[in-house]
Amino acid sequence: MITGTPKPIEEILEMLEPYDNIILAGCHGCVTVCRVGGEKEVQVLASTLRLAREAAGRKIAITEISLERQCDPEYVEKLRPYVSDHQAVLSIACGAGIQFLAEKYAITPVLPGINTGFLGVTERQGEWAERCQGCGDCVLHLTGGICPVTRCAKSLFHGPCGGSSQGICEVGKDVKCGWQLIIDRLKALNQLENYGKLKPYKGWHTSRDGGPRRILREDMI
Amino acid sequence: MKSGSNLEKVLAAGHFSVTAECGPPRGADPEVVRKKAAYVKGNVDACNVTDNQTSVVRMSSLAGCLLIKEEGIEPLIQMVVRDRNRIALQSDLLGASAMGVRNILCLSGDHQKFGDDPQAKNVFDIDSMQFIHLVKSMRDEGTFPSGKKLDGAPKFFIGCAVNPFADPFEIRVPRLKLKVEAGADFVQTQCIYNMKKFKEYLELAKKQGLHEKVKILAGVTPLKSAGMAKFMKKMVAGMDIPDEVINRIAAEPKEKQAEKGIEMCIELIQELKEMEGIAGVHVMAIEWEEKLHEIIGGAGLLPRPVVE
């Protein structure tokens, strides 16, 4: 899923400074699963903002709406009846959702209520960790199902570097060395021979480096 | 000769080689480099110039190389893939070769987290293994990775680094083997303090015949004090300093610890000199270049051979 973290309330209040009447838009997709932008978070954030603004002597009206997904045009359309009656939309969906709203409602300011994180997994309740950078050219079959681009702090294709110590990466004591994980898993799979081959230079053109990406499926259009 | 560098010649002639390193200054003053060069001159076959080590911004390695070259020292340029994509790497290789730099050390580079700019974006377009391959293919095939022909191939004696003390130990020799296959001519190791582990590593490398395919230069760093040893052990990832080494220097009174550190370094070099498979020594006297003559001379490695 796409993960995220709430923006500090002070930052949101500063963004909302010019407005007295806004929509707070949640999303039932990834951000609901990682508990940062769903219906419940919309309620909590709306109350917090109302209280803060009331305490500051300038009330704010907030219409709470949660869409099925903010990254799909049919659901984004559901906001249309409300938008023109409000000065701005505060979205707590991921960056894709926020931008999609901005695109569809060209003359209404759309503001980010969360900081979008990464493509990750729930390791345990309350803890999410990155697994994929969406580089567009997957090599997981060669690396024991563990991604060197994402899990190695230097995205090395022939790790581990000299900074790997007792399974821990040089960047921090809470960071596992991705290449130690790869080696362990290759060993468990009896595929360590995969290590001994020089891999071609990665083509980053399929990643963000090729410019904004687009997937076109002729069979579906 | 692949590069015609002095280091390559000295090693090809079968001499035990000596390299050292110079860290460029944190500023634009060339005098700092010249002063260090004066301590290095005559004591080495080539001198590494580091490339923003520990991600702390310093004068560029290429500029440092040219400054020491002007002083009559053969430069060995260190290049990390942390800060440059393949376009910049290729361009700098051509520039360095054009200016007469004939030795290179291909490195990943410490993560930017350790420096003054931890918020910087890193590059890692290709890794150090692929960088070795890139230099080799430009040198030997005379082509860019794109396949297009070079207008004059860069000439480099290609080096890589290894850390026999990092984990997992079992992958360290296979990783060296890969670097050799990618095109490394020589390797400089991380500073050796744990001789037992290093010997274990060397034996495994020799079993694969790697010492015959690549010149192994053993890395040493003289300890200035017990405090420095403890700091390095604790703070530098992959640095293995056994307690007996620390205890030995700590047993001296503070004012005598530096002297002891040099004595221990000389002993270490003498031991390495006798080991089969070790082709030379790489002395990293960190911000202590003035001691190079004493250390290298003390180890019986002066004067340096002149090979035509």
Image (cartoon, rainbow, N blue to C red):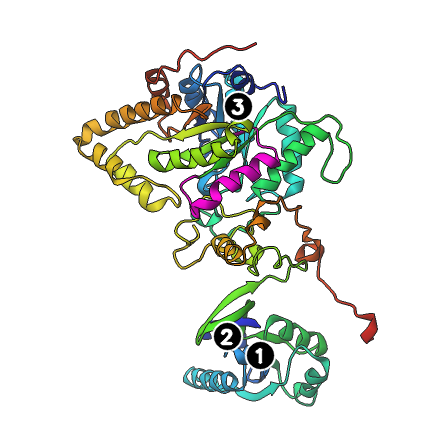
The secondary element bearing badge 1 is classed as strand
- Mark 1 burial class by Cα count in 10 Å: few <14, some 14-19, many 20+: many
The answer to whether the residue labelled 2 contacts the one labelled 1, judged by CB atoms less than 8 Å apart, is yes
Whether the magenta-drawn stretch holds residue B125 is answered as no
Q: Report the chain holding disc 3.
A: B
Which residue is disc 3 drawn over? B75
The picture places residue B151, in percent across and down from the top left corner, at: 76, 27
Mark seen at residue A12: 2
- Mark 2 burial class by Cα count in 10 Å: few <14, some 14-19, many 20+: some
The secondary element bearing badge 3 is classed as strand
- Kind of residue indicated by mark 1: Leu
Mark seen at residue A90: 1
- Kind of residue indicated by mark 2: Ile
In the image: residue B273, left or right of residue B74? left
C-alpha separation, residue under disc 3 versus residue under disc 1? 58 Å
Per the rendered image, the range of residues in magenta is: B164-186
Q: In which quarter of the image is residue B147?
A: top right
Main secondary structure found in the magenta portion: helix
Residue B308 or residue B84, whichever sits in front: B308
Residue A186 or residue B81, whichever sits in front: A186
Q: In which quarter of the image is residue A55?
A: bottom left
The picture places residue A178, in percent across and down from the top left corner, at: 50, 55
The residue sitting at 42% across, 29% down in the picture is B218
In the image: residue B25, left or right of residue B122? left
Q: Report the chain holding disc 1.
A: A
Q: In this view, does A168 lie above or below A35?
A: above
Q: Can the viewer see residue A52 in this picture?
A: yes
C-alpha separation, residue under disc 2 versus residue under disc 3? 54 Å
The picture places residue B65, in percent across and down from the top left corner, at: 53, 26
